[in-house]
């Protein structure tokens, strides 16, 4: 079975951060679904509700990434680099999957460790850390 041909690039001044090249390993990537933000009215003598208006809500880009290093401390340094790249109020991310390219501007990412709020001893022994990045996409 072949690996998925996917690449995520975060634009930074000077040099871009590519998440499928060492010391980063791309685990998963995808854009969230389509969600509407609705304005409705409800009345005391009305069944259900009536839709007054609707606009598309913010989409999110979710990226799962593994940070690697020659030691756990080196992997932590890669995490620090990753956090800095996804913290600005506006940054550009390019996602390429099987030749299809999407470039979006994102808000600061929410970052969640794959192992929860504890250090996973097996990942630490393998000098790696895994995170899920949830990046709101600017319209």
Image (spheres, grey):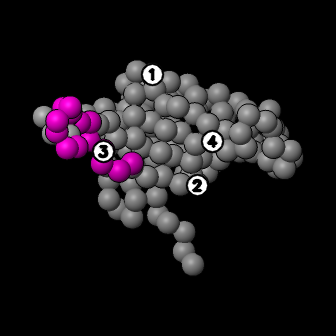
Q: CA distance from mark 3 to mark 2?
A: 25 Å
Q: CA distance from mark 2 to mark 1?
A: 23 Å
Contact (CB < 8 A) between labels 2 and 1? Answer: no
Q: Main secondary structure of the magenta part?
A: loop
Query: Dot 1 corresponds to which residue?
Result: 88
Whichever of callouts 2 and 1 sits on the residue coming sooner in the sequence is 2
Disc 1 crowd, CA 10 A, few/some/many (<14, 14-19, 20+): some
Location of residue 88 with respect to 99 vertically, above or below? above
Disc on res. 133: none
Contact (CB < 8 A) between labels 4 and 3? Answer: no
Query: Dot 4 corresponds to which residue?
Result: 131
Left or right of 28 in this view: 74: right
Q: Nearer the viewer, residue 48 or 116?
A: 48
Question: Can you give x and y, in whole percent of width and height, for residue 44 in the image?
Answer: 20, 31
Whichever of callouts 4 and 1 sits on the residue coming sooner in the sequence is 1
The residue shown at (40%, 21%) is 89
Query: Dot 2 corresponds to which residue?
Result: 27
Question: Can you give x and y, in whole percent of width and height, for residue 112 in the image?
Answer: 61, 36
Q: Nearer the viewer, mark 4 or mark 3?
A: 3
Q: Which residues are magenta?
A: 32-48
Query: Dot 3 corresponds to which residue?
Result: 35
Left or right of 102 in this view: 97: right
Q: CA distance from mark 4 to mark 1?
A: 18 Å
């Amino acid at each position: 079975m072949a690996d998925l041909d996917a690449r995520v690039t975060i634009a930074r001044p000077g040099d871009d951060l590519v998440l499928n090249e060492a010391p980063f390993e791309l685990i998963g990537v995808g854009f969230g679904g389509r969600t509407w933000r609705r304005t409705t009215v409800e009345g005391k003598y009305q069944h259900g509700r009536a839709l007054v208006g609707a606009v598309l809500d913010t989409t999110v880009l979710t990226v799962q990434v593994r940070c690697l290093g020659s030691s756990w401390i080196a992997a932590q340094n890669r995490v620090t680099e990753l956090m800095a790249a996804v913290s600005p109020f506006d940054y550009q991310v390019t996602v390429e999957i099987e030749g299809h390219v999407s470039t979006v501007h994102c808000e600061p990412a929410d970052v969640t460790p794959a192992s929860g709020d504890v250090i996973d001893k097996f990942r630490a022994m393998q000098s790696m850390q895994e995170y899920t990045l949830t990046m709101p996409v600017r319209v």
